[in-house]
Amino acid sequence: MTILGRTLRQQRESRELTQRELADLAGVSQTAVARIERGDRSPGVPLLERLLAAIDVQLAVAVEPLDAHLDAAMTDLAARPVADRIDALNLDRLLDRLGDLPYVVTGATAAVLPGAPVPVEATEVAVRWRDSARFTRWLEAAYGRRWNARWSEFGGLHVDPAEPGEHRWRTRYGEIRATMCDELPDAVEVRHGERGYRVVPVVELEVTDPRAAALLRRWRERR
């Protein structure tokens, strides 16, 4: 249910449709769309096909090895120069927009910069708690919407990281995730062209970030 709901939401948002607009196109209620996207309701195949057909896509079912999508993504990424991967992430634009806010690149994003071909869903940075007010002002100026786990979509929560909720936002410059900390972690500089990035070292990520560590471990096993 979670996978189907997330897929429907991603397809809807990629077409810049609201739940109400999709419901009208498919001839169903907005409540039904919301429940499916939250994972509260398991849709029958006819209903799911109807919703997807309304946005010109269809459901395909296949069987593949567990986490094969990760292996396929890593194979694709490994064939691309790091500079191209940075551009695809829109990383420089987002980091430039942070201005003089102190931060360190962390998570899977920090693993990509030294060359690891791991998938990245959002720019990940570490930000100090004492800078949270500045970070909040930046999020507001960037039209940030916070991830709402209850609704399984962005919006409906205060953007201030001190307020309850995941530290994950969608902004006009892309999605950003923050690790809030008392002090910024030790960092090393990784350079690409004329630009330097302050990143958490890979060896530190493998100790402190379970998700990044799992991706790095999978990459090494495939090598």
Image (cartoon, rainbow, N blue to C red):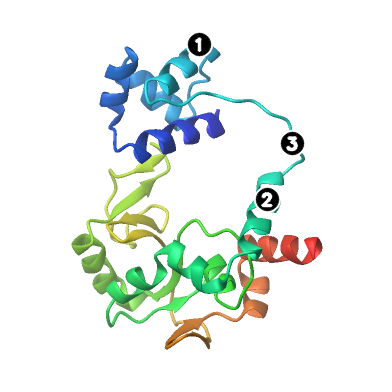
| Residue toward you, 3 or 53 | 53
Give the amino acid at mark 2: Ala
Of the numbered discs 3 and 2, the one sitting upstream in the chain is 3
Q: Which residue is mark 2?
A: 72
Q: Quadrant of residue 79?
A: bottom right
Residue 202 sits above or below residue 217 on the image: below
Check residue 64 in the rendering and tell me which mark sits there, or answer none: 3
Classify 10 Å Cα crowding around label 2: few (below 14), some (14-19), many (20 and above). few
Residue 180 seen in the figure? no
Name the residue: 67% across, 66% down: 213
Residue in the picture at 29% in, 48% down: 157
Q: Position of residue 5 (x, y in %)?
A: 48, 30
Q: Which quarter of the rendered picture does the C terminus lie within? A: bottom right
Q: Confirm or deny contact between disc 1 and disc 2 (CB under 8 A).
A: no
Q: Residue at x 44, y 82 (%)?
A: 183
The answer to which of 65 and 210 lies nearer the viewer is 65
Q: Going 43% across and 38% down the picture, which residue do you hit?
A: 10
Q: Identify the disc placed on residue 46.
A: 1
Give the mark nearer the N terminus: 1 vs 2: 1
